[in-house]
Amino acid sequence: MKRLLCSALFLLVSPLANAVEILRWERLPLAVPLQVGQERVVFIERNVRVGLPVALQGKLRVQSAGGALYLLANEAIAPSRLQLQDADDGTLILLDIVAEPAKAGEPPLEAVRIVEGERPTPRDGEEAAVARPAPPTPLPVALTRYAAQSLYAPLRTFEPVPGVSTVPLRNDLVLGTLMPELPLAYRALAAWRLEDLWVTAVRLRNTSSRWIELDPRRLQGDFVSATFQHPDLGPKGEATDTTVVYLVTRGDGLAGSLLPMISPVDAALNLSRSRDDEE
């Protein structure tokens, strides 16, 4: 009798131990309360980026793995909003969190599973508009826009591009040949690839005391396209003395599209050799 009672008790308790709260995403923020010091799991079945407000840094630990988020509040947190963005299609999901110390005898909060809500049925005349495909964006434009948003755009406005991957920067980039007649300092920031196109973001800094107009026609190299973040640069030391240029190349990274650097010494040696050959 005791063994049967224990078995029945196990059957009653076991489902509770694995209970999962189901939340439906229907474009309204989802409330996910937390208990201080206790981790809560959110199953989302998406590859998401998490937009964490600056005020929560150090207060909330966020880890993502295998379609699940692991949220751990280290201290009490006032009502705050997290943005979850699908890395594949850009869909945003909003979570409203608040963290409070657990009360005496209060059980841990169960895990949360977020599922898609029902999509609204299009009204008359809307279905044709939704089904009409948008004109394709040229790959150099899409890649440049992706690079600029990766560096500077807020998470809520970031537009994912399927197929784009980050590529490592080479250590032997010689950037001084980009616009050698201008007093500029160069630094490569990051690079991405889409099919046979590469884009490299290069920071430009004015080292002179005058304004500099940036003209793509001054760039030296073999580029598919070049886009400046700003049309000009202010004098050195001003807030406007720095910008970024996005250089798109085909078939290889930036190194293969740059002109070689020739020092004055090398030029003099080549000139003397030419004269000797003529004699």
Image (tube, rainbow, N blue to C red):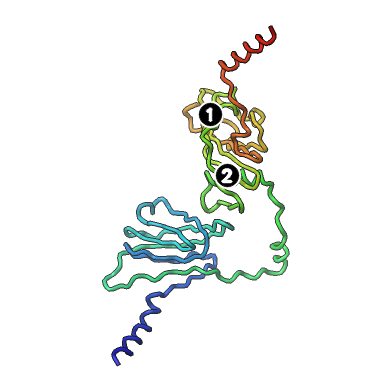
Residue 74: x and y, percent?
33, 58
Residue at figure coordinates x 30%, y 72% from the top left = 106
88 lies above or below 180? below
Q: Which amino acid does label 2 sit on?
A: Trp
Front in this rendered view, residue 204 or 260: 260
The extreme left residue here reads 104
Based on the displayed image, in which of its 4 quarters is residue 183 positioned?
Answer: top right
Q: Residue 192 carries which label?
A: 2
Residue 236: x and y, percent?
49, 26
Q: Name the residue under label 1.
A: 234
Residue 120: x and y, percent?
62, 69
Circle 1 crowding by C-alpha within 10 Å: few under 14, some 14–19, many from 20: many
The extreme bottom residue here reads 1
Residue 136: x and y, percent?
70, 51
Q: Which amino acid does label 1 sit on?
A: Gly
Front in this rendered view, residue 148 or 53: 148
Residue at figure coordinates x 53%, y 53% from the top left = 156
Based on the displayed image, in which of its 4 quarters is residue 62 positioned?
Answer: bottom left
- Whether pointer 2 and pointer 1 mark residues with C-beta atoms closer than 8 Å, the reply is no
Which quadrant is home to the C terminus? top right
Based on the displayed image, in which of its 4 quarters is residue 218 positioned?
Answer: top right
